Amino acid sequence: MSDPHTPSPTPQAPTAGKSMDDIMSLCKRRGFIYQASEIYGGINGFWDYGPLGTMLKRNLREAWWQDVVMLPCWGRKGPDAEPVTNLPLDTCIIQNPKVWEASGHVGGFNDPMVDCRETRGRYRYDHVMVFVPASGDPGDKPVFAYVGDQPSEAKQRKKAEKTFGEVRSVALNTLPQPWTRVIAPDAEKPGTLTEPRMFNLMFDTIPGAIRDEANKAYLRPETAQGIFINFKNVVDTNRVKVPFGIAQTGKAFRNEVTPRNFTFRSREFEQMEIEFFCHESQAMDWYAFWRDWRMEWWKSIGLGGDNLILREHAADELAHYSKATSDIEYRFPFTAPGFGELEGIAYRGNFDLTQHQKHSGAKLEYNDTTRGELAPNGQPKGERYLPHVIEPSAGLDRGVLALLCEAYTKDAARASPEFMKFHPRIAPIKAAVFPLVNKDGMPEVAEKLHADLMKNFGRTGLIETDAKQSIGKRYARMDEAGCPFCFTIDGETLSNHTVTVRDRDSGGQERIAMDQVVPFLRARLNP
RNA sequence: GCGGGCGUAGCUCAGUGGUAGAGCGACACGUUGCCAACGUGUAGGUCGAGGGUUCAAGCCCCUUCGCCCGCUCCA
């Protein structure tokens, strides 16, 4: 178990049988997650982390950082047979608004939508087409709306042809409102479409003390663009060579239409993103490399078994600029038997750098001196290009939620019927030290061992000690908080310097020497 | 944004017009030698918020906020 790359030693039950209500209760009760602004009635789509939740989230972010930036891919070599390089970055939440025009977010976030009152369907206004008679005026007859490439197209065409004979299609936005004779794509009756409405999915704000709409800026909807716009800076100032990556964690904001499912879809959330830059000819190799390693990584911190899947996107699911994308998805109790996205690994081509080069006018090309024709002296002349990008983009809060759901275990046969099977590396509480009873010199020994463990492991997580109440109650409390190991000082400790170690998952105990406690823990926590 | 359900103590919930409760949890003291043991005691709620009806509202009515579920959305 000293190898951090091995999956959790305790495979979990499927999440399908776990109750989200139970998990949410435990999260509140033990201080993992609170509703934001709770005493004022809360605020839709925002959540605060309590002490244990903060530690859990921090441990997950830290594990990512260590394995992505400090010791990239556990020291594994990339497809070029060289060690992987990822440079750290920390960019602003607020950037020049042109960043979001270049990235396509301003356009994409400002689409007007129309709703159908009958089917409660919602459609992008500019995507809705209508079958009208080829001859022109439909008279009093209804016309048939559809969305291209969806089942509604064939269905509506059939109905339209039955009504009019020969038909042609026009965009909905060419017809005058109100659309009283338009039958919505999946509706039966005409006139059910609402007027188009704007959904602004980016939060905006106005920097500057004097409020002026002309200065409008946005809270970033993803951390990725901060990386792209600093690509040239990083290349120019770090003696770094393609292929390499830039990694960043940080908050992002999306005005989700419907925040839902506890913290899964929040309006303020944190991302962990890598933009990995490489030559086009190597891009698919790097894509496969990142996709497979990221999957292994999630397994290494305890998300294993059937609850985690890698899903390759079908061709028609890809964004227009993407040549391949896959999702790492977790089976949450609220998605079961389906899955919810934890991380997307996208091959984005050089779309983003191209966009920023175009919009900013800055030259973002990389001069690759290892490529190109050979000069007379035998050295390559170099090749200038916009690197292609592999983007492994993970949701930190979603990761935390998946860890909580995966760890949550119900076992009515146990004294602690609800407990959290966190992998030791991400467990908020790493260990606890208890005197079996609060007398006969045991508290003093416990205090000493606790201090010792604090000195050795206090920087990796919480080390608890507690002398109150029955030992069973203290074990149960630690189970519920997900503490993997409890060390107990008993009568025997005083005579032969041994303690018992209780394993959270099995409840089993073994006896080890006092001076073996530190090595024991070291072998099981992040080595 | 639509439809449904639900908001009472930290958690789970009872209370259906007449003095706000229980279990668990927390805390204190005692007891206790390995799995939420036992005893005694303590703290904690303007019943999500606002308005209305009534002599009287946790309860009835209206509005609003939040959470859950189903649609929808998820670049």
Image (cartoon, coloured by chain):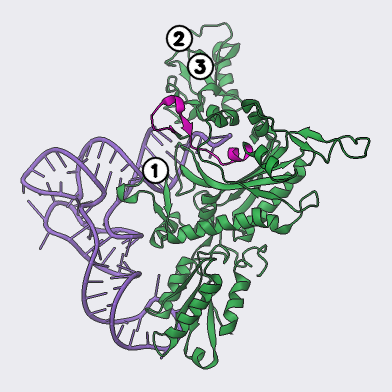
| Residue type indicated by callout 2 | Asp
Say what secondary structure mark 2 lies in: loop
Q: Is residue A142 above or below residue A317?
A: above
Tell me, yes or no, whether the highlighted magenta stretch contains residue A217.
Answer: yes
Reading the chain from its start, which is encountered first: label 2 or label 1?
1
- Position of A513 with respect to A77 (left or right) is left
- Residue closest to the eye, A324 or A83: A83
The quadrant of the image that shows the C terminus of chain A is bottom right
Say what secondary structure mark 3 lies in: helix
- Position of A80 with respect to A58 (left or right) is right
Name the image quarter holding residue A116. Answer: top left
The 10 Å Cα crowd at callout 1, few under 14, some 14 to 19, many 20 or more, is: some
Q: Residue at x 67, y 56 (%)?
A: A296
Say what secondary structure mark 1 lies in: loop
Q: Which residue is mark 1?
A: A44
Tell me, yes or no, whether the highlighted magenta stretch contains residue A190.
Answer: no
Reading the chain from its start, which is encountered first: label 2 or label 3?
2
Q: Is residue A314 above or below residue A298?
A: above
Give the label, 3 or 1, closer to the camera.
Answer: 1
| Residue type indicated by callout 1 | Asn
Looking at the rendering, the stretch of residues picked out in magenta corresponds to A205-228
The chain in green: A
The quadrant of the image that shows the N terminus of chain A is bottom right
Same chain under badges 2 and 1? The reply is yes
Q: Chain of mark 3?
A: A
Q: Which residue is mark 3?
A: A173
